[in-house]
Every structure is written in C-alpha cells, then in structure tokens.
Image (cartoon, helix red, strand yellow):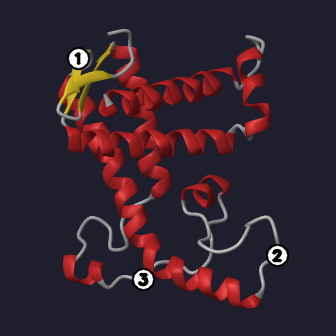
Amino acid sequence: MAGLFESAGGGGAAIALDEVEASILRSLEVQMLELIGPGPGGDGEDPLAALFAEGPSEAPADPALARLFPDAYGDPAAPADEEARAAAAEFRRYTEVDLRARKRDDALQVVRALDGLGGAGVLKLAAGDCLHWLGALNDLRLTLGVRLEVSEEDEQGLYELPDGDERKPLVMAYLWLGALQESLLEAITD
C-alpha cells in the first residue's frame, strides 16, 4: 500500500497510515465535529425528543456550513421567490437535524477507527464503514474547498502554488483528501 486505500474484498478497504497521516486526518475530523456542532439536545439528549426535534429554517451564515447544508430549492446565488424560500425553509427545518447527525456520525466513525489504530499501521474497514469514511472525506474536502475558495475552473492552479503561499498546507490537505476519497471509491467498487 502506498498511503491510499486498496480493496480488502467484500466491499471493504484497507490503508496504511503513518502517525503523521493518522494525526492529521484525526485532527481534521475533530475540527469537522466542532464545526457541525452537537445534536439538538447536547450529550444528555432524550432520544424520543430528538425524533421530533426541528432544525433551523435559515441557511447557516458560515459559507462552509452552507456548503455542507445547502438550500434544497433554487440556485443559492440567484434571488429566490417567496414560495421557493418558504419551501427551502420548510425542507431545512425537517431535514437538517438528521443530516447533521449523519455527518457527525460519519466523522465520529473516522475518529474512532483512527483511535483504534493507535498511531500508525494498516487500517482495515468493513464495507459499512467505508460509506461513513466516504461521507466524512467528502465533507472535509467540501469544507476545505470553501475555505480555500476553490472552484472547478481554478483547481488546476492549486498544483502550482509556490511553497511560500500560506494556503499551501490546506491545499496539500485538500488534494490528499481527494486522493483518499478517490482511492476508497475505487477500492470498494473493485
């Protein structure tokens, strides 16, 4: 293995991570958990109350969160009519809590797997775990892409940043996450 995912059979995957890679990935996922925030009732949440919890009706102000939890209707760059705004608010109110919970669960799955690795080694993922990892890697990449203001048109320019550019470490993480995501997808479809 060369630091990318390989098929482990049965829809599973494996990756060899050194301590630095595992630490960076864990740190990014912990930051993702902090960005997403706790569930509606916090740690001592009543499971029955959580089933009926309503989410916000407004899009998040943070551009990264807005990318992770986009409006369901209309182009966010174009002014929406009142009906489209109302529909988007209603959809968000009933779906964002569950979407946040899923994204939180994906990130937690990655953190727990990395904690179980104990620093460095070969991490083997069962088929079901791979889906959590794909979601978590995608969320990290989307968030970094927003923070770096990456668009499809200028992604090629990321490879040409000078070493002194202050964005370089985040760009390296963004590109690495993309490679991990792509290799995991290939590994589970082999």
Front residue of 85/111: it is: 85
1 vs 3, front mark: 1
Label of residue 79 in the image: 2
Please give the residue where the numbered disc 3 appears in the rendered image: 54
Label of residue 60 in the image: none
Q: Residue furthest front?
A: 190
The amino acid beneath tag 1 is Val
Give percent across and percent down for residue 59: 62, 71
> Is 44 above or below relative to 130?
below
Q: Residue at x 21, y 82 (%)?
A: 48
Q: Residue at x 52, y 23 (%)?
A: 176
Give percent across and percent down for residue 128: 22, 44
- Ranked by sequence position, the earlier of labels 2 and 1 is 2
Dot 3 crowding, Cα within 10 Å, few <14, some 14–19, many 20+:
some
- Ranked by sequence position, the earlier of labels 3 and 2 is 3
Q: Spatial distance from mark 2 to mark 1, Cα to Cα?
A: 49 Å
Q: How many marks?
A: 3
> Is 56 above or below relative to 131?
below
Q: Residue at x 78, y 23 (%)?
A: 157
Please give the residue where the numbered disc 1 appears in the rendered image: 122
* Mark 1: secondary structure: strand
From the viewer's perspective, tell me whether residue 91 is left or right of residue 67. Answer: left
- Ranked by sequence position, the earlier of labels 1 and 3 is 3
The amino acid beneath tag 3 is Glu
> Is 108 above or below relative to 47?
above
Q: Residue at x 30, y 38 (%)?
A: 111
Q: Spatial distance from mark 1 to mark 3, Cα to Cα?
A: 41 Å
